[in-house]
Image (cartoon, helix red, strand yellow):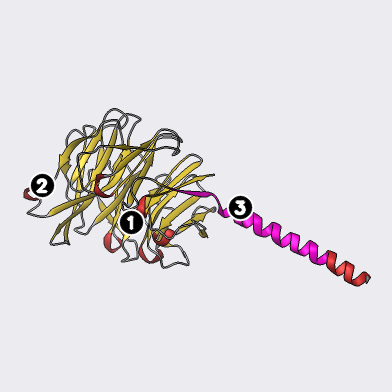
Amino acid sequence: MKLTIVSGIRLSILLFALITITSNQVSAQQGWVLSKVGSTSIDLNTAYFLNSKRGWVAGDHGFLSRTDDGGRSWVKQTVDTRDGINDIYFRSKEDGFLLAGNGIFITRDSGNRWTEARRFLPSEVQGGSVELYSVRFSSKKKGWVVGSISKNDIVVDSILVYTDDGGETWTRQRAPSRVELIHLDFVDDKHGWIVGAEGTILYTFDEGRSWNRQNSLTKAMLYHVDFRDDRNGWAVGEKGTILRTTDSGQTWNPIGSNVRTTLLSVQFVNDDEGWIVGRGGLIMRSGDGGRTWIQQESGTKQNLYALNFQKKIGWAVGGDGLVLRYER
């Protein structure tokens, strides 16, 4: 009888311990809260937040929506386009930029009104069709946009354009690559990087006056690049590709992801903590500066196309109007 009671007590303690451990694990995985914005037939391609309260999500058919209360409510905004919106970026609280198809749109009043600043016509690119993907500014006046030029749905050239007057005018600059250029990032007024098809990585150390190739040691499509400073950066892409550099991109080292899923966006919130999102609802987190990555529970199988962190609040957007919010 004593043995039975003792065994029962031990079993109860063991079960309690297992339940406690499991509960802690589940709790740790429940950081992302799912919601929907707009029609479920619309994929959201990009998200940008100025602070913990004000932000935008955008996607197919010119859909754009803004929140001023941290995502509790959303208000649809009007942009004069039916093209998919690929990127949003603000260089200040008032001045923002939006890319849709072959057009660059601009706001000077914190996103209340958006007007077209530039559209690239087929006559300007030998009869091709321009698709703009990514916009970033290195200073108040200087900014860059990258994308591709295609004919009959086949990419025939890259496109790289810049402004030195705060976005009023945009001029094409020849890039040392004719493949699709998908994303760029600047860490200061001198240092910037571009990633794209066939493992392409381009860099500038002279304020964008010249761009040169870096060796990525991969032919995988690279979709996103993120630098913390002028030395430490990461790039992600298809087939679970994660690249890391600690020397400004002179060398890029592959990091094991243990997945074959296409990775679409990466962002580090400090020197140690980084996040990646991708297809099939994939979310990964690093707590050691990107040396190792652990898969997180997202609660969805929808593709996640973009990621944006502002201090302790993170956002991810994806298929069918999906918006995920995370509080660190």
Mark 3 → mark 1, Cα distance in angstroms: 31 Å
Residue 191 falls in which quadrant of the image?
top left
Judged by its main secondary structure, the magenta piece is helix
Point out residue 27 in the picture as x, y percentages from the top left corner.
61, 52
Which contiguous range is marked in magenta?
A: 10-35
Foreground: 70 or 37? 37
Mark 1 → mark 2, Cα distance in angstroms: 25 Å
Closer mark to the observer between disc 3 and disc 1 = 3
Foreground: 179 or 327? 327
* 18 lies above or below 53: below
285 relative position to 305: left or right:
right
Residue 214 falls in which quadrant of the image?
bottom left
**Element type at mark 1:** strand
Point out residue 66 in the picture as x, y percentages from the top left corner.
35, 37
**Who's the residue at 42% across and 37% down the image?**
73
User: What residue occupies the far right of the structure in this picture?
Assistant: 2
Closer mark to the observer between disc 1 and disc 2 = 2
**Element type at mark 3:** helix
Instruction: Name the quarter where the N terminus is drawn.
Output: bottom right
Mark number displayed over residue 223 = 1
Please state which amino acid type lies under the numbered disc 2: Leu
Q: Which residue is mark 2?
A: 121
Q: Is residue 292 visible?
A: no
**Element type at mark 2:** loop
81 relative position to 301: left or right:
left
- Quick one: label 3 or label 1, which is nearer the N terminus? 3
Instruction: Name the quarter where the C terminus is drawn.
Output: top right
- Quick one: label 1 or label 2, which is nearer the N terminus? 2
Q: Which residue is mark 3?
A: 27
- Quick one: label 2 or label 3, which is nearer the N terminus? 3
Point out residue 156 in the picture as x, y percentages from the top left corner.
15, 60
